[in-house]
Image (cartoon, helix red, strand yellow):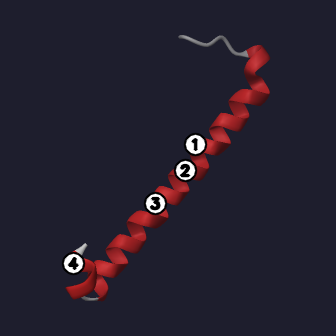
Amino acid sequence: MIDLLTGGAEVRNKVATQAGLLQIMEKWKQDERQWKQRRAPYLLYGR
């Protein structure tokens, strides 16, 4: 956290990139969850 305050643009860009990746992963997980809910009648869980 201190790096954010004292570090340069490089550190901030690194943090921003990580946050962006987390958002993309979270959206992907949500999409996958929705897809599974739609397909639930056809899928066998626990395999």
Q: Residue at x 46, y 57 (%)?
A: 22
The image's mark for residue 29 is 1
Secondary element type, mark 1: helix
Q: Which residue is mark 3?
A: 21
Mark 4 falls on what kind of element? helix
Do the numbered discs 2 and 1 sit on residues whose CB atoms are within 8 Å? yes
Which mark, by number, is residue 15?
Answer: none
Q: Earlier in the sequence, mark 4 or mark 2?
A: 4
Task: State the image quarter where residue 2 is shown.
Answer: bottom left
Q: Residue tagged by mark 4?
A: 3
Query: 44 or 8, which lies in front?
Result: 8
Which numbered disc, 1 or 4, marks the residue that appears first in the sequence?
A: 4
Q: Nearer the viewer, mark 4 or mark 3?
A: 4
Sort mark 1 into few (<14), some (14-19) or many (20+) by Cα contacts within 10 Å: few
Label 1 and label 4: CA atoms lie apart by 30 Å
> Which residue is more in the foreground, 4 or 15?
4
Number of numbered discs: 4
